Amino acid sequence: MEKESFDTALRELTSKRSSFKGRLTKFKNTLEILSNSKSIPQVEISKLSIKLSRFEGLFTEFDELQTQIEILNVDSQEVELNIRDILEQDFCYCIATAQQLIADNSSPRKSSHSCCSNEDDRDRSLLGFKLPTIQITKFDGSYYKWLEFKDIFTSLVHDNNKIKDVHKFYYLNSYLEGEAARVISNLEVVDKNYVKAWQLLCERYDNKRQLINNHLKALFNIDTVRESEKSLRFIIDHISKNLRALHTLGLPTESWDMIIIFIVSQKLDATTALKWEECRSNIRDLPTLHDFFEFLRNRADVFETINKNKNIRRSSSADMPCSPKHKFQTSKSFATTSSSTKAIACSVCKGNHRVYECLAFKAKSIRDRLSLVSSLNLCRNCLRNNCNVEHCRLPGGCKICRQRHNTLIHVPESVDESSAPVETVSMSSLSSTELADPTFNIPSEPDMILGAELFWSIIGTEHHSLGEHRPTLRSSLLGWLIGGPIGIVPSVSKTSKTIHCNLACSDDDLSNQISKFWELEKVPSKPSYTEEERLCEQHFLETTSRHDNGQFRVRIPLRCNRDCLGNSYTLAEQRFFRLEKRFIKQPLLKKLYVEFMREYADLGHLSVYNEIPPDTAYYIPHLPVLKLDSESTKIRVVYDASARTTSGFSVNDLQMVGPNVQDSLFNILVRFRQYKYVLAADIEKMYRSIIVHESDRDLQLILWREHPTQPLQTLQLNTVTYGFASSSFLSTRCLWQCGQECAEARIADIIKSDFYVDDLLTGAQTEEDLIHVQQSVSGALAAGGFHLRKYRSNSTALLNSSLSNAQGDLSISNAASTLGISWTSSSDRLNFPIKFSDPGVITKRTILSCTFKVFDPLGLLSLCTIKPKIIIQRLWSETKLGWDDKVPLHIESEWRTFVKGFQNITNLSISRQVLIENPIRIEMHSFCDASELAYGCCIYLKSCNAKGEVQVRLLCAKSRVCPIKRQTIPRLELCGALLSSDLSNSVTKALRCRIDRHVYWTDSKVVLGWLQTSKSAKTFVANRVTAIQEVSDSSLWRYVPTTQNPADLVSRGVDPSNISPCPLWWHGPDFLLGSEESWPSQDHNKSMVELPELKVHMVEKSNDSFFNITNISRFTYLQRAYAWLLRFIHNSRNPNDKLTGPLQASECENSLRLLIKISQKESFQSELILLSNKEPLKPKSILSSLNPFIDVDGILRVGGRLVLSDFDYDKKHPILLQASSHLTKILFQYEHVRLMHAGPSHLLGSIRNRFWPIGGRNLARNTTRSCIKCRRFRGETMTNIMGNLPKDRLTNSFPFSVVGTDFAGPFLITDRKGRGAKISKCYLCIFVCFTYKCVHLEAVSELSTKAYILSLRRMISRRGIPHILLSDQGRNYVGAAREITSFLTSKEYENSVVDFTSKLNIEFKFSPAYAPHFGGLWEAGIKSAKFHLNRVMGNANLTFEELSSLFAQVEAILNSRPLCPLSSSPNDLQCLTPGHFLIGRPLSSLPGPSFAEVKESRLDRYQRLERARQHFWRRWSSEYVAELQQRVKWRTKCTNLKVDDLVLIKEPNAPPLCWQLGRVARLYPGSDGIPRVADVATAQGTIRRALNRLSLLPSDDSA
């Protein structure tokens, strides 16, 4: 961003400097005009004084501007210093010249001036003199300018209390530009906004860090210092300025001396660095920055003194008189050194600038620049004279490759070498040698790439030299390799340094153009305007005006600024002198030339140019062109506007050529054959009827004099000049504008369409109408300054009127050397004046030249002219002859036979008019045919009158040579059919008569089959069939036998001697004269399956739309995207009526209708087919109850029962949609969001106002349910199915083998009874047996690790050591249990308890956080214990012993709870309780043997007790465990949670919208494979939670 801002600032400053240069040039031109004047009026002196004062201010502004550019453009410091030097010299020269002119021409008025000055002195301040006005430099947003601007503006404006705030705001705006101005651009200039604006600026640019960075960057990025006084002084100023700024910003710059000295000394040139080291050794202590600056100043003074002495010696040597012997050389030296304004001369264009600033030099290619540098002996580094790159002292080098040369002559590595074949030297010894690469002289791709390890194995030992300075042959396994020099003998001179450059080039452009003869046909189309042509048209509309007499005044359309033009006077002078030498040899030519120029001047088309020509003036060389057989002008002066100036540019290079606004000659001639009466005329001096604007006439200067003794005159051409690149466009565009402004539409169309440059070819059906056309066209053109002349017509009534008719035939051609069509007005017939001269030797060049001389725009001679095109193709394909090589004998014989027969064409004469008189019906018949050599077509107009007479005549024809790449005959026939349809379409558009019928004829049944089949063909055929069907209907194509097809003559070619007696060609087949019943009919028995190039593979038909709507998941995006697609289709089909700008509501509505139709077609295809065929729906159809119908737009709607209601149309007849379609789903989603996440009922009701979705209620529920925002707001957590009982609860073991523990409380206790007792807290610790639900309660005095371990010891001492001890993590306690929570979650508890239990081989397990249901047993025990404790204790405060006793009693009660009935007998009142499993064994006893199967009489008392205990366990396993089979809750599975699912983590004290978001990282399935715990990755880390604390968010798949 920072670099872009610097580049932008540099461009703005450079643009301002260009403005300064322009003002400097104008002031300089004014001084030159005044200096050349003999006397200067006093008014001009006064004006000059005013301009001088302003010019001096401009000088000051330039100095500031240039300083800013030099600071920014550090990389091009040398260039900027040179620009400063040049412009400062120009400023000083102009100021000195102006002061001298004022002093020489001013009248003495000292006394009055003295009086005024005395009065002024009395009014001045106490200082006694007037200080200059302080100018505040504009601030453009550059950080390094901010401190200076801020201090000056604050001192002069901001702190001035006499200035109102609104005025301060105005001043502030006037001093800001660029980025700084945009900071406050949105504030209105009012009084109250000033403080805010100043505050905004300070906040933006009082960036101390940014300011420091910029100044430090300027210090560290110093460019290399040159060995000159300017460079040394600049570096002193640059360092001082940045250090002062950094010191102002509070940095300790006073201690940076050694750092700055080290940085700058690295940038010094070698000589200056050496001098500094010498100076530094004389300083005892460390050098200071002051010492370093003092050294640089002394060094700069030395350079300045030396340079001044050099300048004095140069000026003195220039002023010395020279001897006659060296007079010419001395005058040249004087011209280049004496004037201070031309101290710098460009070696390329001789301009007042350096070579690297020369536009002409930059405009050349890199190779041309290198050639210029070598030829002009310029330094490759600095591009200056008298300097060598080895000894060039200027720093720098190429900015691209960092080599020692200028960037302008850097040759990129990507520049490919010439790929042209190298011309081999004739070597007879190579004829019998087997080369590894026989075509080594022809560039091609490498065949293989060999590694270095294989190269020496392939190379052989034999070698043969082909002679001195010739290549050498080296043997190899692949054949002989050739390499070496190509026969250039080196120079024997030792003093000269010869460099041989070998360039291989190829001139294949002409061959490539000729090959277009036999390329496949291209569909003709009217080219659209290029960008330059559009700019040229816009330039014409903006700059063209009308003179008082109606003439057009135009400006020359230039591509760029004219500053790139160099000196053109010298070339124009040299060529005029050569013209005068020609005048001496040809007096008649001089006489005609002088008469022409006099006429030119008499008409006011040129005038004497008396002003001082600017540097950008252009002198046009001119030369004569004689045409003695011309009817109007025997001589025509041609102006060579393409002559290049010294800069390499001509005035034509600067001009835009412009588009062609006139109709094609083909269309004009087609219409010319339509009319009964025709008119031909041309515009007199068309180009010279248009005036060129005065400001552009200095580009049309010529040199002229009638006699060599007269001085050369500079004349300016005042009108449009032929020879200019833009003249054709300007003249035809002005002519077209006359038609545009014509009120009568028909006449306007004639002026726009019937002119070919300045020639008019038009007509009418009656003589009266033709006279009206002539008068109207002549009048409309006369209003624009154009005058018609040389009328020709076949109407005697028109010629008998007062018109200046021309005699002779009208020749229509496209060039002076082309043999065109001739029209004889008296006989109204067309003929072809052909004259072929014998060229002697027949070559490829002569055949091509003679072929192109025949100009036949209508193709009337196509059956003959196709033969030389075939000959040319054979020359290219069969032979490899050069352009001037003699052709083979058989081709020469064939060509001479053709030329001999072509002489008969001169006697050929055909009728111009193709229509019968007073036609009432006109038909167009187009015939086409093809052969192996060529294909073509011809068009006939069949016209019938009221008398029943029929006339058929050839209108036009076209032919093309077949491509060299061989094509099948059916393909070529198809190409001919395409050419026929395109030509017919073009002719129809060109004619101004109505064509009642089109008929297309071909003798190819395959082509007819291709046009009529519905099967898909291969690409070549399909493309051309489509193109044919776009301009013609397939039903209009008919079959014609080959013998009756006139296009067969075009495809085969006819000898010119047989063209005249050929009625088939000129009048078409005889059957056209008869009725349609007599026309040939096609044999339709041929099966379409026999057609070639049809796609026969099976393709499954797909109903997919070309626009897949399922790719877009938002309704508004889909609607707008489809609307843009429809706009693109509309603009492609209607280029003249394009839609632009943002989408309109109508476009979006049309897009929605089409999307609905696509969706309905996918969902209700069968119903749409039935309704389209007016058939009823099937009874089982889902739409049968809605009585659907198709509206006028093709959309399926509900018929319903609300027809008589007052609702709108969409409400009465809503659009049917299927809920499963993609469009319906995203429509529901859009409506749900639009209604601010309404519920299902509200959503469905809103949708049904326009649409009727089938299955919409379920879709509304699903849409609401799958909405992420709605899901988050509900905050529903997951509850999975209740898991299987763990194995620990189902295994027979001793009580308390698997124990769960938890805390409850606190309970308040006293330390003693009576008064003064101290109240403290006590807690309940519960231990629950997992197998038998036995409960053990312990009183704990405090929440500490030691107290807990003691309670655990007591439990173990009385109940035994458990194998597994389970506990939760205590995060579910709130309120009073906060202390328990903190205790259970502490690291001390976890580490100490786990350490203690591990010593006793007890496994300690924790349940997940926030999952109390994982410890249901101990949670239920806590609940039951509290139930009894709360009722017994109430608010009493017991002692610890009393509370322990109460806990023991509650424990006994809980252990007496029934687990299941002890027996199934109703008389048995005992039940199985946990207490049964606690009585009957000592705490340390071992399991005894089983006594279940032993008779009771055989047992002693102990065995009886053991048998009772075993009976309890058997009852527990058979009855109590069975009771646990049923799931009392959590009976169903929740949504299948997967890894990477997005979930919300339920927080206890936060609303759902504030719950933390996470993604499932890992799942922990239980023994049944169902996960109930998951690891969730969050922004703060990974945490573990039970599923009942997670809320699953819907994904795309679930939605």
Image: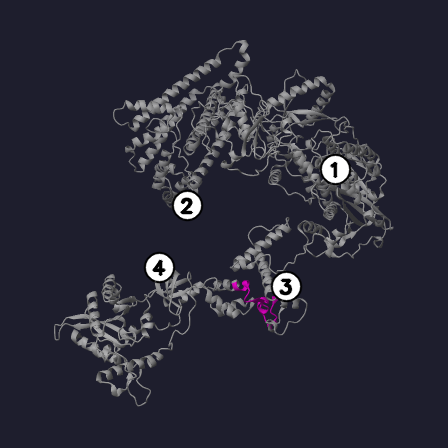
Packing grade of label 1 (10 A; few <14, some 14-19, many >=20) is many
Determine whether the residue tagged by mark 4 lies in a helix, strand or loop: strand
Q: Is residue 795 visible?
A: no
- The residue that label 3 is drawn on is 1194
Q: What distance separates the C-alpha of mark 3 from that of mark 1?
A: 56 Å
What amino acid is labelled 1 in the image? Lys
Labels 2 & 3 near each other (Cβ < 8 A): no
Q: What distance separates the C-alpha of mark 2 from that of mark 1?
A: 81 Å
The label nearer to you, 3 versus 4, is 4
Corner quadrant of residue 685: top right
Considering only vertical position in the picture, is 1437 above or below 1127?
below
Find the magenta span and give its range.
1196-1225
Q: What distance separates the C-alpha of mark 2 from that of mark 3?
A: 61 Å
Whole-percent x, y for residue 1597 in the image? 48, 63
Whole-percent x, y for residue 1574 in the image? 37, 64
Of label 3 and label 1, which has the lower sequence position?
1
Packing grade of label 4 (10 A; few <14, some 14-19, many >=20) is some
Whole-percent x, y for residue 548 in the image? 66, 34
Labels 3 & 4 near each other (Cβ < 8 A): no
Q: Is residue 730 visible?
A: yes
- The residue that label 1 is drawn on is 869
Determine whether the residue tagged by mark 1 lies in a helix, strand or loop: helix
Labels 2 & 1 near each other (Cβ < 8 A): no
What amino acid is labelled 2 in the image? Val
- The residue that label 4 is drawn on is 1582
Left or right: 1454 in relation to 1238 = left
Total marks drawn? Answer: 4
The label nearer to you, 2 versus 1, is 1
What amino acid is labelled 3 in the image? Gly
